[in-house]
Image (cartoon, helix red, strand yellow):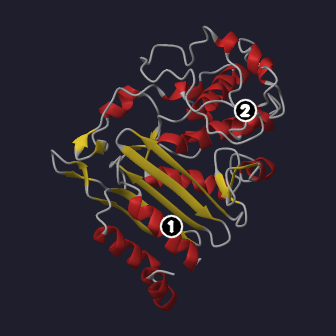
Amino acid sequence: MSSIAKEVLYKMEIHTHIDQFLIEQGFNGSFLFAYEGSVRLCKGYGWADMEQKRPNDKHTIFKIASIGKQFTAAAIMLLQQRGQLDVQDALAHYVPELPGLGYVTLHQLLTHAAGLDEDVHVNWDVDEDLEPLRLEAMDRIAPTYKVGSFHYSNFGYALLGLIVERASGRKYETFIHEELFLPLHMERTGGHLASYLAEKNRAIGYAEGKAAWKQDIPSYNSAGSILYSTVKDLYRWERAFHATQLIGSEGVRAMFTPHVAIDNERGYGYGWMIYSERRNTAYHNGSLAGFRSTLYRNTDKDAVLIALSNLGDTGLEPIERLKQDIASWL
């Protein structure tokens, strides 16, 4: 146990120690820590824009990368709850353009167990007016790995986003905005590139001390990977799971079950990584040009840690050490 964790055990003022630790380690981003239903620390650190000396604060928006896969998974669960699809359905029912993957189930796509490469056929350099997926030559795609084993795939979640569209009759972004963000008052969460660029209090992504901006694909193309949000909005999102506010208890239980083993310590649920021996603890990280993010929750202690950084190379290094300290304290 580190010195930080030992001090916490004696003084029980974890938020004070977290704040000091983040300052000492030079964390650059926005951070939120909540415990037993109460936000103990929520603030920004360092610069959102290093050139203009504009600081990060608790309202700054960041690209959250793969944390957005939770929204895709929740959309699928919401559609199942309404009887519009079933996670055991075969992909062929929704995307007949993929005969080589026709027998793969939605459950296998949700758990990264469909045998797909990470980014096969995800076009990372398209404009917002293009379709989510380019379906030409799809008839030749087949699993690269053994179906049923874990292989992380952005393409798999892009397919889930397409399924959300076809099952609901609405564009992916429209569906998650209307069904997830609006009901939870997540007013600073979205995916449209123009909205992000127009936001005055947005973080500029950096890597190796230089701006790392690139023209990212629209969020529907990777079904959530290019969304932006704030620590406060993501806490509203986590609280919705805590209260089974949008997704019923059965759906929440499915999302936080480690269905497929990642390694000896972790399994993958639906948009969440869960510790096999500590199923009360789940998280997901995100990584994108100039940005790093993590959302971590412990349901036994009702503890939540959310960190969004605009340092793409070192942003989460102090956070990963901090998560270990918090886990040992809890």
For the C terminus, the image quarter is bottom right
Q: Is residue 102 above or below residue 320?
A: above
Question: At 57% from the left edge and 31% from the top edge, which residue is drawn?
Answer: 223
- Badge 1 marks a residue whose secondary structure is helix
158 or 208, nearer to the observer: 208
Question: Judging from the image, what secondary structure is the residue with disc 2 in?
Answer: loop
Left or right of 212, for residue 190: right
Three-letter residue code for mark 1: Lys
Q: Residues within 10 Å of mark 1 (few under 14, many from 20)?
A: few
Write down the residue under mark 1. Answer: 323
**In 3D space, how far apart are the residues under numbered discs 2 and 1 (Cα atoms)?**
30 Å
Is residue 104 found left or right of 116 in the rendered image? right
Residue 12 visible here = no
Q: Nearer the viewer, residue 276 or 22?
A: 276
Name which residue type carries label 2.
Answer: Ala
> Can you see residue 105?
yes
Q: Residue lying furthest front in this view?
A: 145
Quickly name the residue at label 2: 114
Residue at the spot 77% in from the left edge and 47% down from the top edge: 251
Q: Position of residue 51 (x, y in %)?
A: 15, 45
Name the residue nearer the viewer: 296 or 192: 296
Quadrant housing residue 214: top left
From the top left corner, tell me how far across and down residue 169 is, in percent: 68, 19
| Residue 261 at x, y percent in the picture | 72, 51
Choose the circle earlier in sequence order: 2 or 1: 2
- View extreme (top): residue: 136
* Residue 174 position (above or below residue 280): above
